[in-house]
Amino acid sequence: MQAITAELKIWWQQVSDGWNQFWFRPILPHSLAVIRVGSGLMLAYMHLIWLLRQADFLGPNAWIDRGTSQMLHENDWAWSWLWYTDNPWLTGLHESLALVAALMMAAGLFTRVVVPLVWFFTLMTCHRLTFALFGLDQIAMMLAMYLMIADSGAVWSVDSRLHRGESSGKWWQPVSGLRTRNNLATRLIQVHLCVIYLFGGLGKMRGEMWYEGSALWFTLVNYEYQSMDLTWLGKSPWLIAMLSAGTIFWETFYCALVWPKLTRPLALGMAFFVHAGIALGLGMITFGLIMILANFAFIDPRWFQNVTGRRQG
C-alpha cells in the first residue's frame, strides 16, 4: 500500500509540475507584441468602418435598431450603453475614441491602459451590432481580451522606448523580459483557437457536402463571396474533393496536431494556406489576416526576437 501511495504522489507531482510549466512558465512578450500591433490595426480598421457608416450601424434607421438589439440580449448578461442612444454625435464620439485607442494599442503607447479601453469600446459596439458581426470582430475581440493580461507593449512599442532602462514598479508600465503573464495570455489564445477550430470542424462534419467532397466547390462558385474566378477547378473534381477532405481533417484535428513540435509546422502551415485562400479566394481579406495573426501565438517568441537581431529583455 505504501508503494502505491508513493507512486500516486510521484504521479501527482508530475501532473502538478506539468500544469504549472504549461500555464505559468515565464516567457518573452515578442509573439504577443506582433499580435498587439496587428490586432490594434485591425481594431482601428473596424472602428473606422463603423464610424464612416455609423448611420447604417448605429443610427435611428440602422439595419438593426436599438430596441431590436436590446431585445436580442434579453436572456443573457450582455449590456451596451449604445442601446440607449442613437445620437450621431455620441455614437461618433464613441467610435472616434475607440479608433484613437486602437491606434495607440498598435503603436504600444500606454499599452496597459489602452488595450482594456479598446476591448471595452469594441465590446459595447459588438453588443449593439448583434447579427451585424462576423468572424473578424469576434477574433479581434478575443485577442484584445487576452492581451490585457500580458506585457505586449514591452517590446516594439512607444512604451518600451519611453521607459527604457527604468525599473518599472508602476502598474501601467509594461515590463520587458520573461513574465508569467505573457505565458498565461499566450496559452489562453492557443486554447481558445483550438476550441474554435474543433467546433468548426465538428460543424462541418454535420454537412454531407464535406463528406462527398463538394463543399469547397459550392463555396468557390458562390457569387456573394467570389473574388477570384476559380471555376476552372471544376475540371479536376478529385482536387476539390481532396481539398475538402484535407480542410475538414485539419480543422477538426488542429487541436491535436498543433501541440507536438513534430506536427506543429504542418498545422500552422495549413492554417496559413487555408486562411490565405479565404482572404484571396472568398474576398474575406480581414478575416483571413486576423486568423493568421492569431496563429502567431503558437510561434516561439524567441524566434521573433532572433529575427529582429535584437535581444530585448
Image (cartoon, rainbow, N blue to C red):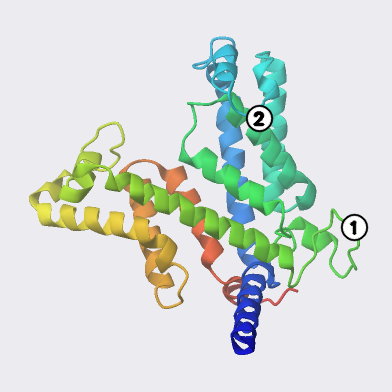
Kindly state the secondary structure of the residue where label 2 is placed.
Answer: helix
Q: Is residue 273 left or right of residue 38?
A: left
Q: Position of residue 50 (x, y in %)?
A: 57, 28
Instruction: Tell which circle, 2 or 1, labels the residue nearer the N-terminal end.
Output: 2
- Give x and y (percent) for residue 250: 33, 60
Locate the N terminus and report the quarter of the image it occupies. bottom right
Task: Identify which amino acid the numbered label 1 is placed on.
Answer: Lys
**Figure quadrant of residue 182:** bottom right
User: Is 245 above or below relative to 301?
Assistant: above
Identified by mark 2, the residue type is Met
Q: Position of residue 90 (x, y in %)?
A: 72, 19
Q: In the image, residue 146 lies at what x, y percent?
A: 65, 52
Q: Regarding mark 1 in the picture, which secondary structure is present there?
A: loop
Which residue ends up furthest to the top in the rendered image? 61
CA gap, disc 2 to disc 1?
A: 28 Å
Q: Would you say residue 110 is visible in this rendering?
A: no
User: Does residue 279 sit above or below 134 in this rendering?
Assistant: below
Disc number placed over residue 170 in the picture, else none: 1
Q: Is residue 215 left or right of residue 118?
A: left
* Residue indicated by mark 2: 124
At x 20%, y 39%, the residue is 218
Residue sitting at 74 percent across and 40 percent down? Answer: 117
- Relative to the observer, which residue lies in front, 134 or 233? 134
Q: From the viewer's perspective, is residue 131 above or below residue 41?
A: above
Neighbour tally class for label 2: few under 14, some 14-19, many 20 plus, Cα within 10 Å: some
